[in-house]
Amino acid sequence: MSFGNHIIQLNDTREMPLLGLGAYKTLDDTELKQGILEAFSCGYHLIDTASFYKNEEGIGRAIKALSIPRSELFITTKLWNTAQRIGNIEDSFYRSLERLGLDYLDLYLIHWPVPGCFCNTWQVFEKLQSSGVIKSIGVSNFSIHDLELLKEASDITPAVNQIEMHPLFQNPELISYCQTNGIAIQAYAPLARGAYANSPLMIEIGKQHQKTPAQIGLRWLVQQNISVIPKSGQKNHIEENSKIFDFSLTEEEMSAISAMNTGQRITGVPEDMVPYL
C-alpha cells in the first residue's frame, strides 16, 4: 500500500487516503476516464462510487487504463437500499466487483441505514470481509442512533461513516461520536456544490493563504482528520482540490469557519428514506 503521507488510520489497521475523487452522477465514459487519469496524476489514490451511481463499469474501464499497481488504488463502492430490502446483498456486491473489474474492494459501505435491514446487512458485510474480498467495511449517512443499533448487533465497528459535511452542514455531535468510537469520517459534498464559494469569510481566509474558498473548505475538513471526496470532472478543479496539504489554517481561522454552520444540507435524501430521517 502506498498512499503517501496524507492518510487516515482506520480502526481495522488499514489506511485510507484523506483525499479522493467523488464520482456521483458522472456517467460519461470519456469524462470518467479523463477525470480519473487527471486525479491520479495529481496524487489522488481514492475513487468513490456506488451501485446507485450507475457508473461502476466506466470506472472499471478507467482503472484498467491507469495501468498502475492495484495496491496504489483505494476503491470504494456502496450497497443500495433495494438490495438491503430484498436481502440481495452478496449478489449485489459481486455484481459491483465484476462491473469494476476488481478482485477485491478496499471499502464497501451500506449506502443508507434502511430500518429493519441494516443490522442484517452488516452481518453479510462481515462475512464478505472475512473472506478477503473486502478489505474494510463501513457505512454512509448513519446517525448516532443507527450506529448505536449496529453496536448492539455486532462487535465489529464500522471503519468509516461517509456523510455530508462542509462548513454549512457540520453535525458536530455525530463527528464527536464517531471520532470517539474510532470511526473515521469521510465527507461527501465537501464543497457544498459551491454554496460557500462566495462567502466573504472564506474569500478573506483564502487571500491570507493564496488559496480559493474551495481549498480553504477542504483544508478545514482534512485538518480535522476528515477524509474528503470532492467531485469534479474538470482538470483545473481536480488539480486545485489536490493542493490542500501545503498550508495550515490557524486556530482562529478554524473556529471562524466552524461558526458558519447553518445546518444547510445540500444533497437530497432518497424518497424511500425520507420517512425515517
Image (cartoon, helix red, strand yellow):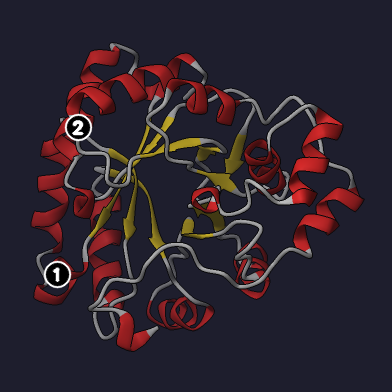
* Image x and y of residue 79, in percent: 23, 59
Q: Specify the label residue 28 is tagged with.
A: 2
Which amino acid, mark 2? Answer: Asp
* Image x and y of residue 227, in percent: 56, 45
Query: Left or right: 16 with respect to 64?
Result: right
Q: How far apart are the alpha carbons under marks 2 and 1?
A: 25 Å
Residues at marks 2 and 1 touching, judged by CB atoms closer than 8 Å = no
Q: Which residue is mark 1?
A: 82
* Image x and y of residue 143, in percent: 49, 76
Which mark is first along the chain, 1 or 2? 2
* The C terminus: image quadrant: bottom left
Q: Residues within 10 Å of mark 2 (few under 14, many from 20)?
A: few
The front one of 233 and 152 is 233
Q: Quadrant of residue 234?
A: top left
The front one of 197 and 110 is 197
Element carrying mark 1: helix
